[in-house]
Image (cartoon, rainbow, N blue to C red):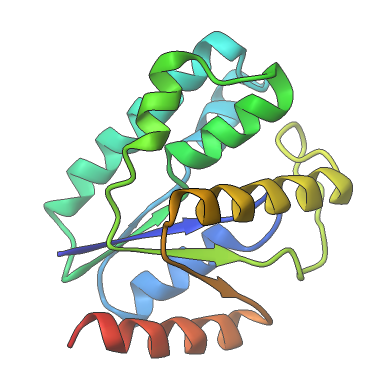
Amino acid sequence: MQKIAILGAESSGKSALAEALALRYQTVWVPEYLREFVEQQQRVPLASEQAGIARIQLEREAAALQQANHWLFCDTTPLMTAIYSEHYFSEPDPELAALAAAHHYDFTLVTAPDLPWVPDGLQRESPAVRAKIHERLMDILEERGIPHLLIEGSLPQRVEQVEFALSFLSM
């Protein structure tokens, strides 16, 4: 089983890519729990709730592994939660920082912020925040030496780029 992290700033196409890849590879994907949290609570999470959101995301990944067919596509990881926590609350709490540091994925895809920015109620802020978060994500991946591929273009172009990259992982 290969776990693929799909990371990116707000409104960069992570969910659409994860769903399309799951369909293409006849497997399952793990939706971003934060989206569900915001819809249920009708508010953005507090600093004290960030680690819990990351834990639930990881629990859902573990559960989805039981149903996955060779690939598991994960729409976000604790790393993105930590980056946003840093942006909004100065720094993630120690538990969240530890969850974000424990990167257990076979490969990481990063969705470029090259799609039109679309507001999403409470969860998305602005194109400027999207650009800032994308830059921070790229810096962290480089600092930590996490292999990744920047995925750009339309959804079909993105799926094609991922197919090419994953063909090397499945050898």
Which residue lies most toward the top here? 48
Closest to the observer: 102 or 167? 102
Where 122 falls versus 41 (above or below)? below
Q: Position of residue 40 (x, y in %)?
A: 55, 24
Quarter of the figure with the C terminus: bottom left
Where 23 falls versus 50 (above or below)? below
Quarter of the figure with the N terminus: bottom left
Q: Where is residue 37 in the image (x, y as percent from the top left)?
A: 52, 27
Going by the image, does 5 lie left or right of 169? right
The residue at 43%/44% (across/down) is 77
Going by the image, does 33 lie left or right of 28? right
Closest to the observer: 84 or 102? 102
Res 118 visible: yes
Closest to the observer: 26 or 83? 83
Report which quarter residue 165 is drawn in.
bottom left
The residue at 25%/69% (across/down) is 27
Q: Position of residue 83 (x, y in %)?
A: 60, 35
Please state the total of marks drawn on the protein image. 0
Q: Position of residue 70 (x, y in %)?
A: 16, 71
The residue at 75%/44% (across/down) is 120
The residue at 47%/44% (across/down) is 32
Closest to the observer: 12 or 112? 112
Going by the image, does 153 lie left or right of 23? right
Where 103 falls versus 86 (above or below)? below
Where 3 falls versus 71 (above or below)? above
